Amino acid sequence: MSRIVKKNKIEQEVSIPSQSPKSSLGVRDTDFLLRLIKRSTFEGSEIEQAYSVISKLGNIHRSYLED
């Protein structure tokens, strides 16, 4: 799978690796990422994006814990 990315008015094709079971995140991965983010600091302009990522990651982590 690939997509077209515009960079400096030049179209480039960027390859996007397909997600395979080997590259999926597990409960230990999501726990590690959440702990790492917890210790991080963010610029004001990054807060909205950080919140979005943390919410998604938290939902994935909770779904693993419920199984």
Image: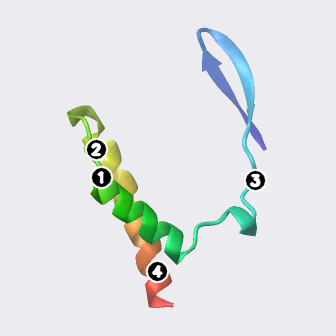
Mark 2–mark 4 CB contact (< 8 Å): no
- Please tell me how crowded label 3 is: few (under 14), some (14-19), or many (20+) other residues with Cα within 10 Å: few
Residue topped by disc 3: 18
Residue topped by disc 4: 63
Task: State whether residue 17 is above or below residue 63.
Answer: above
Mark 1–mark 2 CB contact (< 8 Å): yes
Mark 3 is on which residue type?
Answer: Ser
What residue is at 39 percent from the left and 54 percent from the top? 53
Q: CA distance from mark 1 to mark 4?
A: 18 Å
Residue topped by disc 1: 51
Q: CA distance from mark 4 to mark 3?
A: 22 Å
Q: Position of residue 26 (x, y in %)?
A: 57, 73
Q: Upstream in the sequence, badge 2 or badge 4?
A: 2
- Please tell me how crowded label 1 is: few (under 14), some (14-19), or many (20+) other residues with Cα within 10 Å: few
Q: Position of residue 3 (x, y in %)?
A: 71, 34
Kind of element beneath mark 4: helix
Kind of element beneath mark 2: helix
Mark 4–mark 3 CB contact (< 8 Å): no
Mark 1 is on which residue type?
Answer: Tyr
Q: Upstream in the sequence, badge 4 or badge 3?
A: 3
Mark 4 is on which residue type?
Answer: Ser
Tell me the colour scheme of the image.
rainbow
Q: Upstream in the sequence, badge 2 or badge 3?
A: 3
Mark 2 is on which residue type?
Answer: Glu
Question: What quarter of the picture does the N terminus occupy?
Answer: top right
- Please tell me how crowded label 2 is: few (under 14), some (14-19), or many (20+) other residues with Cα within 10 Å: few
Kind of element beneath mark 3: loop
Task: State whether residue 10 is above or below residue 41.
Answer: above
What residue is at 51 percent from the left and 90 percent from the top? 67
Q: Which mark is residue 48?
A: 2
Mark 1–mark 3 CB contact (< 8 Å): no
Extreme residue toward the bottom, this view: 67
